[in-house]
Image (cartoon, helix red, strand yellow):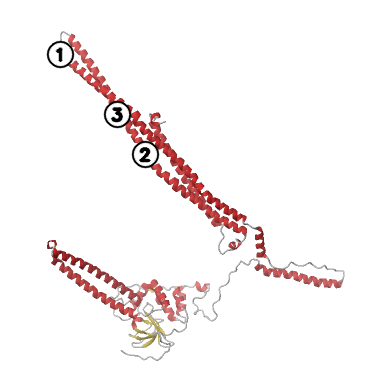
Amino acid sequence: MSWGTELWDQFDNLEKHTQWGIDVLEKYIKFVKERTEIELSYAKQLRNLSKKYQPKKNSKEEEEYRYTSTRAFLATLNEMNDYAGQHEVISENMTSLITAELTRYVQELKQERKSHFHDGRKAQQHIETCWKQLEASKRRFERDCKEADRAQQYFEKMDADINVTKADVEKARQQAQLRHQMAEDSKAEYSSTLQKFNSEQHEHYYTHIPNIFQKIQEMEERRIVRIGESMKTFAEVDRQVIPIIGKCLDEITKAAESVDHKNDSQMVIEAFKSGFEPPGDVDFEDFTQPMKRTVSESSLSNSRGDGKSEPKFGSKSKGKLWPFIKKNKPPPPPPASASPSAVPNGPQSPKQQKEPLSHRFNEFMTSKPKIHCFRSLKRGLSLKLGAGPEDFSNLPPEQRRKKLQQKVDELNRDIQKEMDSRDALTKMKDVYIKNPQMGDAASVDHRLAELGQNIEKLRLEVQKFEGWLAEVEGRLPARSEQSRRQSGVYEAQNASGVNSCAQDRESPDGSYTEEQSQETEMKVPATDFDDEFDDEEPLPTIGTCKALYTFEGQNEGTISVAEGEMLYVIEEDKGDGWTRIRRNEDEEGYVPTSYVEVYLDKNAKDVHKPLQKISE
């Protein structure tokens, strides 16, 4: 049973049938795809359902899940979540094993079908061409035969006519012979074309077309087998998750069987039991005897009093029926010894929390620790920078050290590049010396000299910046971990603000100015105020300092010093360019670090000895 022998003349119908088969396959792919979407949607809905009925944390519902029935329900919710996961597995497996594979196979099937029917059309066109050649040869043979017959009749007519000359008769005879020869040639050509056509036709219908149709038949049978295998896979994908789904259902059944009504009843008793005894029997009151009546009344009043007291106690124990219900506690009050200004991090009233930042600023500026407030403001400033000096002296020490270190690294990289170029030119010069035909060795001497000069200049620059760096690192004091942490946070948040403040304080000629930039942007974060108001105890001295220049402290938090004056250091520079000093127990404040020379002493005591003024 072959399509090539049985359906040799059904080329068009086979083309339609195979296209229908591809359409069926694409329809099945679409069906499986929609099934996977349904599985995903179902799994999502199951997960949402399970999540919806899960107990909320830190709520009354969570405490209710101590009963066996509610625990079984919770286990059911968890198992339903796993159940939903199996439907997701079904969707994934169907997508990868059926949809993706069949989609790729359909593309291959279309290409194969197109190739087979292209070969079939080509064979049909060839046999049709042979048929047309046979028809043309046949018509030519028929025409030549008719021409030869007419020429023969004309010759016989001329030969029978006595009035026709002999030359005309001879001419007619030659023409008749020529026509007969052409007819014979056409006959031979027609016979040859006919034989060739019969051979081509036999090969077409018994060889070419059967082979092509056989390939189409095999292609269609593979399609049928493939769709059958896909349907089998469709069922296997479902069957693979049945054991896991069965386990989920078994767990739900196990959870349901674990429900213990006796246990739940006992838990209800433990939850709501008051511990009081039921009221006793009411005494009989005999109204026939006054004495007994009096005794009965007193007894009745006592029993009634007891009856009234029981609900009273019951009301008191009402809060104990549900011991797992917690009440909201009020926030703890601030310490009695602490004042509002001394406890900035304590609980604030809603009115204080809603106050504008400007009100808080004015309140802190007029409060007792003005020095801390000024430092907080100084940290919050953000000014725009212009071009600074070469040694970055306008920056705070820590930032200056970083800038100098970056500059040294950059110069070292430039030196390495120049040295690499010099080495390359040196090698080139050696090659020119050994092979003069390749180039003139003297032509690179000028460039080598330039590189040498550049390297020397760069090394001088490195030495200069390394000197500044060593000077900065020598002056930077060792800071505690807390200071480093505060300075690191400050540098990360307000680096641009500190640089701008430093530039505004020191002019290019080294003189100090109190003038602020017109483009000052005030930023006073609430955390800065809170961090600075830790306590009001006086800070111990950590060293001494000598004023190098006269400084007129005009702003809040600063202190005026005279040139050559010796003072105590109570807080070192934290990277913002300011040092906190103390003259006596009542006078302390901030001065620019560049205006004093600090002598740190770890063993210094907080003893305010009289310091004399030293003139330079």
Identify the residue shown where x is 60% and y is 68%.
326
Separation of disc 2 and disc 3 at Cα?
A: 26 Å
Separation of disc 3 and disc 1 at Cα?
A: 43 Å
Q: Quadrant of residue 600?
A: bottom left
Q: Quadrant of residue 109?
A: top left
Relative height, residue 53 to residue 370 (above, below): above
Residue marked by disc 1: 170
Of residues 604 and 491, the one drawn nearer to the viewer in this rendering: 604
Determine if residue 147 is in view: yes
Residue marked by disc 3: 129
Q: Which numbered disc flags the more N-terminal residue, 1 or 2? A: 2
> In this rendering, which labeled residue sits more in front, label 3 or label 1?
3
Question: Regarding mark 3 in the picture, which secondary structure is present there?
Answer: helix
Name the amino acid type tagged 3. Thr
Name the amino acid type tagged 2. Glu
Q: Which numbered disc flags the more N-terminal residue, 3 or 1? A: 3
Query: At which x and y percent is residue 272?
Result: 67, 65
Residue marked by disc 2: 112
- Residue placed farthest to the left in the image? 437
How many numbered badges does the structure rendering display?
A: 3
